[in-house]
């Protein structure tokens, strides 16, 4: 079907395969490959994007459902090459390892902070529960969220203890 | 130039340096193999066997071939190539026999994924189905069907492995130290128990993916999510009898690997499809479901441990029997067996030891390398056993461990003498125990217990591991100076998330005395452009590549000093340098910048001298030997990284439900290069270890069908599952031959988490857990003395 969608501030008009998900549309048609596919089944959160301002798993939404909608992806998070505050906090707190979960994580954190500007640790865990990360063990991601919401400063040596 | 001139001023090593790759990864700009698309690219799909053991009677591909958009269809019959890392036992596509559920029997390349999927559905396969061999212990039975009747005719690496033709055993590794009979005779107590682990999945967030192009003239290019480009190239070339200079392997960013991407996987199949499709590039990415059974897993293990203990609490002898479930192919499992065998007793001083470690074929997806390389599995049994032995002899488990720990002067199972520079397991154990207030409950914990009605228990466990690698493992680094005096480092150690690029940049910056911003570590790996590295595995990268990078920096500086000596009319011993320039020590105003020397120095009149500054560094593991096949004696260990975990758990004594209150872990890393990335590696491993401990497992029915190939049915931990508190502690006993004193810690955080957890639960409830994972119902069973569920095979659902 023919659809029109605003992605990261640009209007795209495209013929889209009806059974394609928004994730395939973004990655394969628009070549916005920053959003990742970890399962295609709504289990991992790697594909999280903002649809009309709310976080969704792009693999669980048909592209056709985004007709007329506004979509934001990781590609729009940094402005003119400057990392956003969330991204900078991830970098400061070593919250990135392989990076495959990162786009989805950043989107979920953005959603969390939109709804709650000073989340507790429990609320952060809840907020990113749908985003699997196999590398970091989540701790430094949680610290990045505490950091960007002004609640901690991990100081030097990345929180490592020495004996 | 005297040797002392080139010294390191540590300004980055040990300090906070942000990851060099985080901007690319945080903005979506980092390209992974799964993101790559090429002109003319085709998409592959495979037909997978629904049976665990079957004969392929016939395959009809005609309907698939006729589907518009299909460019190549292949079956095993057309492919006469075999692959295998240590035992060459795997066809590219199953030929006559299917050996595990999910095995590929046919493949298609088409213009789109949708067409390829439809074509695969149109392939008809006729099978004659046989009852599978599922338990590795059953597979040892004389009357068991053979998974590989032709084992005797397979090629294998003779220096290290011992296949037993006519059986299901592709390898036995033996270790013999001292005299175990005498050791048991001396013992006051002899305790024998058996411990088991099921198979589990690596679950990298990026599933396996590759694109292969095989053009006319045998020009092959492979883009892959593989961990080890040179090993991939080597195995590929051996299978197809191609010279190495015909095959190029490129590795972009990799979305997690954990050992599962260490060997060779679908690249040969995609190559054959490409060749058949006229040389068009062919891409395949596994679905999450395929990741569980088309691709390999971690082997299951049954570990039988018999320990003799003297009246003074010292271990006198240990007999250790390992039964590794290799699944359908030998792949890394034979080497997991070997590496586990020589490490099998843990960081303890065992005067008399006997290890027989078997790798055993079964009709299940095959086992491969997985973070820890066997140690996560056998330390489950070993560190549970230490706990149970301490209980039997009436000694505190911490005291019992301390009494038996390796110390300077002790020898390992293979006869290696430990010294004070090897690392300090005692310091790790004490740090972990202290961090959880081991042996007592704090007043807050007493309160909490009273409030919740749950019991709080504390457990500890030790660990050690050395890289499992050939004795002659080698690597190289090249460092090239740009005309502005910045540098680019080329290595073939891949960046799979572990932070290699960042620590290499830090080490190079300090060795050169440059700011880290002037050092770039190239992102992509490319066998045509990068210097050799064996593999990105085994926690050996930091030590070997680190040393090669230091040597490369020194080589570059030597060239720069030599050119500068000419320009400054001095001898190299008269010179020194800072981050910008080389100068005469006595008169620093006489200097020449690195930028001016970088691509050859030019005199005012236009004369040029010197040339591009390019440093080469090599490093080979020093002094290691093969192991004697009968006794296992020799020197296999590049370095030993020791560690320990402490866990506080809170358990409902009725239901077996529990939560993890705290995990605290200490590792002797020699020298912390980057505290933030080290802590990240450690916590990541600790939580992966907790996943293995708490919930992860393959579950089969009695016909060998995998029942839980998804992240819904095979859960990994989420943020909500984290312990309330996580603490990571560094111990720094310098490794004398390590770069800046450092040794690797990539795998270690995952090892022994499971027994530390089970020991805490044991402490709280007395539950004698011997089977992993430790789900709530397993704790309930153990508390109420019900037999454990240990086979992870359930009855097939009635049809
Ligand atoms: S790819 Fe969408 S949730 Fe995993
Ligand atoms: S950083 Fe690798 S999955 Fe999160």
Image (spheres, coloured by chain):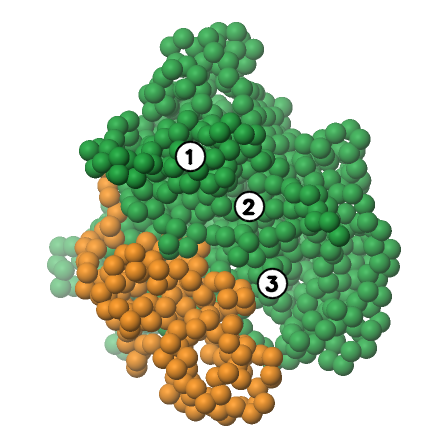
Chain colours: A orange, B green
Left or right: B253 in relation to B121: left
Asked whether residue B525 is in view, the answer is no
From the image, tell me which residue sits under label 1: B654
Left or right: B114 in relation to B593: right
Disc 2, disc 1: CB below 8 Å? Answer: no
Question: Pointer 2: residues within 10 angstroms few (<14), some, or many (20+)?
Answer: many
Name the front one of labels 1 and 3.
1
Q: Earlier in the sequence, mark 1 or mark 3?
A: 3
Q: Is residue B228 above or below residue B639?
A: below
Using the rendered image, report if marks 3 and 2 lie on a common chain.
yes
Q: Position of residue A54 (x, y in %)?
A: 38, 76
Left or right: B171 in relation to A2: right
From the image, tell me which residue sits under label 2: B697
Q: Is residue A60 above or below residue B175?
A: below
Name the front one of labels 3 and 2.
2
Residue occupying the point 44% across, 55% down: A134
Mark 1 to mark 3 CA distance (whole Å): 43 Å
Label of residue B286 in the image: 3
Q: Earlier in the sequence, mark 3 or mark 2?
A: 3
Using the rendered image, report if marks 2 and 1 lie on a common chain.
yes
Q: Is residue B69 above or below residue B667?
A: below
Q: Is residue B130 above or below residue B187?
A: below
Chain at tag 2: B
Residue occupying the point 59% across, 35% down: B790
Camera-nearest residue between A79 and A132: A132
Chain at tag 3: B
Q: Secondary structure at mark 2?
A: loop
Query: Where is residue B142, by image quadrant?
Result: top right
Q: Position of residue B46 (x, y in %)?
A: 70, 64
Using the rendered image, report if marks 1 and 3 lie on a common chain.
yes
Asked whether residue B315 is in view, the answer is yes
Disc 3, disc 2: CB below 8 Å? Answer: no
């Amino acid at each position: 079907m023919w659809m029109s969608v605003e992605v990261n501030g640009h209007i795209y008009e495209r013929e889209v395969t009806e059974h394609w998900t928004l994730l395939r549309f973004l990655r394969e048609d628009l070549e916005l490959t920053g959003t990742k596919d970890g399962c295609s089944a709504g289990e991992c959160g790697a594909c999280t994007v903002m649809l009309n301002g709310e976080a969704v798993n792009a693999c669980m939404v048909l592209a056709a459902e985004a007709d007329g909608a506004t979509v934001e992806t990781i590609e729009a998070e940094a402005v003119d090459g400057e990392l956003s505050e969330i991204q900078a906090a991830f970098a400061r707190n070593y919250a990135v390892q392989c990076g495959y979960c990162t786009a989805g994580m950043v989107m979920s954190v953005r959603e969390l902070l939109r709804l709650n500007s000073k989340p507790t640790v429990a609320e952060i865990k809840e907020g990113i529960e749908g985003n699997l990360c196999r590398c970091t063990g989540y701790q430094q991601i949680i610290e990045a969220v505490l950091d960007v919401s002004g609640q901690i400063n991990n100081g030097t040596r990345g929180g490592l203890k020495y004996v | 130039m005297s040797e002392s001139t080139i010294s390191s001023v540590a300004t980055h090593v040990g300090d906070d340096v942000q990851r060099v790759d985080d901007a690319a990864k945080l903005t979506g700009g980092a390209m992974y193999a799964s993101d790559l698309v090429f002109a003319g690219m085709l998409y592959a799909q495979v037909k997978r066997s629904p049976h665990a053991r079957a004969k392929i009677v016939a395959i009809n591909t005609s309907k698939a071939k006729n589907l518009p958009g299909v460019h190549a269809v292949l079956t095993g019959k057309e492919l006469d190539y075999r692959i295998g890392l240590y035992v060459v036992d795997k066809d590219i596509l199953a030929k006559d026999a299917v050996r595990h559920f999910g095995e590929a029997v046919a493949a298609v390349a088409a213009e789109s994924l949708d067409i390829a999927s439809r074509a695969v559905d149109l392939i008809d396969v006729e099978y004659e189905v046989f009852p599978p061999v599922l338990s590795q212990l059953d597979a040892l039975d004389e009357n068991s069907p053979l998974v590989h009747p032709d084992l005797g005719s397979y090629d294998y690496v003779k220096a290290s492995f011992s296949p037993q033709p006519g059986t299901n055993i592709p390898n036995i590794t033996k270790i013999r130290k001292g005299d175990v009979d005498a050791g048991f005779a001396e013992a006051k107590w002899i305790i024998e128990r058996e411990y088991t682990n099921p198979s589990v999945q690596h679950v990298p967030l990026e599933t396996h993916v590759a694109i292969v192009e095989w053009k006319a003239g045998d020009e092959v290019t492979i883009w892959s999510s593989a961990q080890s480009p040179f090993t991939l190239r080597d195995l590929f070339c051996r299978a197809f009898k191609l010279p190495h200079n015909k095959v190029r392997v490129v590795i972009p960013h990799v979305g997690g690997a954990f050992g599962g991407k260490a060997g060779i996987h679908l690249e040969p199949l995609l190559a054959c499809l490409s060749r058949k499709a006229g040389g068009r590039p062919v891409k395949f990415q596994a679905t999450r479901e395929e990741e569980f059974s088309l691709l390999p897993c971690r082997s299951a293990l049954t570990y039988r441990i018999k320990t003799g203990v003297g009246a003074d609490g010292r271990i006198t002898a240990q007999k250790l029997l390992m039964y590794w479930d290799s699944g359908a192919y030998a792949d890394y499992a034979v080497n997991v067996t070997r590496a586990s065998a020589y490490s099998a007793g843990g960081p303890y001083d065992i005067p008399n030891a006997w290890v027989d470690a078997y790798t055993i074929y079964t009709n299940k997806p095959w086992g491969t390398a997985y973070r820890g390389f066997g140690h996560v599995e056998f330390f489950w049994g070993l560190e549970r056993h230490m706990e149970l032995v301490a209980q039997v002899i009436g000694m505190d488990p911490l005291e019992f461990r301390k009494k038996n720990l390796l110390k300077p002067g002790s020898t390992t199972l293979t006869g290696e003498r430990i010294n004070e520079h090897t690392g300090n397991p005692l310091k790790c154990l004490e740090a972990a125990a202290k961090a959880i207030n081991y042996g007592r409950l704090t007043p807050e914990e007493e309160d909490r217990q009273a409030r919740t009605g749950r019991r709080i228990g504390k457990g500890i466990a030790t660990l050690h591991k050395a890289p499992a690698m050939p004795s002659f493992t080698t690597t190289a680094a090249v460092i090239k100076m740009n005309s502005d005096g910045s540098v680019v480092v080329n290595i073939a150690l891949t960046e799979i998330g572990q932070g290699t690029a960042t620590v290499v940049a830090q080490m190079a910056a300090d060795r050169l005395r440059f700011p880290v911003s002037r050092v770039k570590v190239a992102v992509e790996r490319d066998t045509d452009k990068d210097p050799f590295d064996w593999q990105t595995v085994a926690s050996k990268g930091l030590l070997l590549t680190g040393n090669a990078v230091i040597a490369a920096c020194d080589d570059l500086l030597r060239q720069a000093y030599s050119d500068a000596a000419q320009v400054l009319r001095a001898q190299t011993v008269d010179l020194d340098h800072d981050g910008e320039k080389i100068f005469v020590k006595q008169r620093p105003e006489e200097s020449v910048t690195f930028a001016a020397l970088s691509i050859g120095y030019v005199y005012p009149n236009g004369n040029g001298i010197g040339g591009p500054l390019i440093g080469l560094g090599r490093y080979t593991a020093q002094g290691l030997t093969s192991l004697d096949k009968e006794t296992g004696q020799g020197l296999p260990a590049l370095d030993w990284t020791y560690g320990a975990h402490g866990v506080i758990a809170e358990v409902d004594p009725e239901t077996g439900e529990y939560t993890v209150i705290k995990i605290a872990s200490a590792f002797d890393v020699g020298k912390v290069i980057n505290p933030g990335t080290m802590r990240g590696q450690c916590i990541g491993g600790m939580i992966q270890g907790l996943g293995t401990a708490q919930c992860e497992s393959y579950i089969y029915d009695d016909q060998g069908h995998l029942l839980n190939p998804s992240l819904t049915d095979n859960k990994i931990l989420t943020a909500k599952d984290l312990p309330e508190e996580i603490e990571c502690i560094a111990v720094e006993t310098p490794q004398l031959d390590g770069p800046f004193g450092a040794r690797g810690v990539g795998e270690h955080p995952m090892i022994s988490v499971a027994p530390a957890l089970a020991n805490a639960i044991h402490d709280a409830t007395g539950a004698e857990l011997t089977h992993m994972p430790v789900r709530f119902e397993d704790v309930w069973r153990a508390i109420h003395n019900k037999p454990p569920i240990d086979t992870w095979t359930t009855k097939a659902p009635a049809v």
